[in-house]
Image (cartoon, helix red, strand yellow):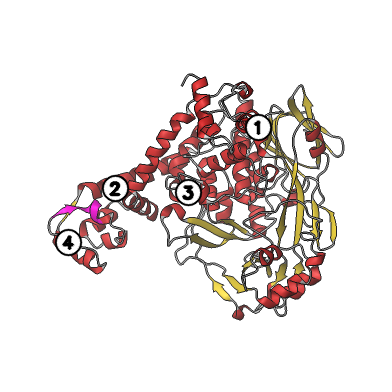
Amino acid sequence: MFNEVYDVIVVGAGHAGSEAAASAANMGSKTLLITMNLQNIAQMSCNPAMGGIAKGQIVREIDALGGYSGIVSDTSAIQFKMLNKSKGPAMWSPRVQSDRMRFAEDWRLLLEQTKNLDFYQEMVSGLIVENGKVCGVTTSLGVKIKSKTVVLTNGTFLNGLIHIGDKNFGGGRAGERAATGITEQLVNLGFESGRMKTGTPPRVDGRSLDFSKMVEQPGDVNPEKFSYLDTTKPLTQQRSCHMSYTSNKVHDLLREGFDRSPMFNGRIKSLGPRYCPSIEDKINRFADKDRHQLFVEPEGWNTVEYYINGFSTSLPEDVQFKALSSVAGFENVKFFRPGYAIEYDYFPPTQLKHTLETKLVDGLYFAGQINGTTGYEEAASQGLMAGINAALKVQERDPFILKRDEAYIGVLVDDLITKGTEEPYRMFTSRAEYRTLLRQDNADIRLTPKGYDLGLASDKRLKRMEEKHQSAEQFVQFFRDTSVTPKEINPVLEAKNSAAIRQQDKMFKMFARPNIGIEDMKKIASVSEYINGNNLDREVIEQTEIQVKYSGYIAKEKSNADKLSRLENIKIPANFDYSKLQSMSLEAREKLNKIQPVTISQASRISGVSPSDISVLLVYMGR
């Protein structure tokens, strides 16, 4: 293998690396996945769960494009929940609690069954770069392996430093060494680097907990699943999570250790994730709160290990233990391991193109936490996109870029390379201006044709999507075309305190009323007959209901997206020199020269670039 020239080498086998390797190999590229420990492929370093607010939409999008995260989430799930069901469908977000050991095992077995994919266990210490182009990697043993492209997915391992109280030591994850050499080489090549931090809570022995003092959190009564494929069935059995709370006593005990906290004594200087703060950060920033939620999450079907979500900390282990022992249900707690914080190197993502290829080195791609993101789902989606684009580059095909109105993945990548990030970036529904279009229920309709064109989605997957889409469209048309009499509909309307009708009217108008759902409409004989006669499944019925009830919002958002896409079509010449546009603000010229946007639309989203600056640019370009 050392004499081969690979099409794609992927460095790191976390969530980003696993998706990158799978996508490149499945597209026919000869791919090598190098990692420091093959036993830890797709390790869930933090919480044992996939999905959640906006993250669930990303997993559905990965699945629709032909990635593996959705499939593995289903095969290793121990609980399923659809979050935000009380809100509109744009906010619905699937989430699974996973069996940590099974998740990693299923990922490895899937990768081992993937054609064109080789594996190697070693630390990559450097890149082979010649004339501004990457040509392979060098390992810590001095082995040189050549390739046409390289995808770096190093996670928290680049010069990783673990903190527990006043102790610190090198490591990329608990029990694993840090990776060295790459950052220094990239900086010498001209890359800008920075430091970020993240943290993780203690893991505890479930046998030492008193769950009767906690609030049980079961899964959905009728659980769904992530993948659009029929690889698995929805769960029939589930494991519950539990919830407890901190208290003023717990907070006081935690404060006693603040003088030994690396976060407060200045030993940690880098920024952590704003939306997943440590417990000491929470009680410091939100001093008016007398309690905080703690979610007690099982790590698998059979293990007794539990993850204490909400208690991320880098305080000394004795302080962690003393404080957690004062939480209801934790009086006799036994630790498997204390929580810790980790600092690591990242590279501001404004140094990337939309393909996630670096601007400085041809054929080199970054994906995951190396780009300043946080979360398995964000990492996996970047890995998928980097793997796809590395394979396309080798195959001399056009790059694959998702726009902001096409996918949350498109929003994520555009945010990173256009705006950059100085703190760990996490996806939220609020970041997507077209979230009514980018729902979790229609990710397959939006993206499966693209996955099929890339060679990642099968004929079977495409056919299944087309049948679902066609069935939903026909059912919507049924409601548009079919009238209903007052005699048929009024009992339904009156039962929901909705105004009765006096004359025959289209069913679509009745169904579109906010308090009338599909279960109400099923009480009309012709609707039930249509559903049974056409053997419609839950997905088609749900898709139809959304299309009817939110048709106005969807149409408006599509119209807005179409208007803005005109700016997306106005290309800016490569290496355009903004310095000569003296009518533009100095800040705008500096930002535009640094980021080098590809389109007018992207330029308009850069922080510090005003509408008047865009007008100057349009005038200069003859627009």
Q: Name the residue under label 4.
A: 488
Whether the magenta-drawn stretch holds residue 412 is answered as: no
Q: Compare marks 1 and 3 and give the one earlier in the sequence.
A: 3
Q: Name the residue under label 2.
A: 476
Whether the magenta-drawn stretch holds residue 508 is answered as: yes
* Disc 1/disc 2 C-alpha distance (Å): 42 Å
Rendered image quadrant of residue 358: top right
x, y percent for residue 234:
49, 59
In the picture as drawn, the residue positioned furthest to the right comes out as 141
Q: Residue 602 carries which label?
A: none
Label 3 with label 2: CB-CB less than 8 Å:
no
Label 3 with label 4: CB-CB less than 8 Å:
no
Q: Compare marks 1 and 4 and give the one earlier in the sequence.
A: 1
For label 2, the crowd category at 10 Å Cα-Cα, with few meaning under 14, some 14 to 19 and many 20 or more, is many
Q: Compare marks 3 and 4 and give the one earlier in the sequence.
A: 3
* Disc 1/disc 4 C-alpha distance (Å): 60 Å
Q: Mark 3 points at which residue?
A: 228
x, y percent for residue 99:
63, 61
Residue type of the residue flagged with mark 2:
Val
Q: Compare marks 1 and 2 and give the one earlier in the sequence.
A: 1
In the picture as drawn, the residue positioned furthest to the left comes out as 503
SS under mark 4: helix
Q: Compare marks 4 and 2 and give the one earlier in the sequence.
A: 2
Q: Compare marks 3 and 2 and give the one earlier in the sequence.
A: 3
User: Which is in the foreground here, disc 1 or disc 3?
Assistant: 1
For label 1, the crowd category at 10 Å Cα-Cα, with few meaning under 14, some 14 to 19 and many 20 or more, is many
Residue type of the residue flagged with mark 3:
Tyr
Residue at x 60%, y 47% (from the top left corner): 378
Q: Name the residue under label 1.
A: 357
Rendered image quadrant of residue 148: top right
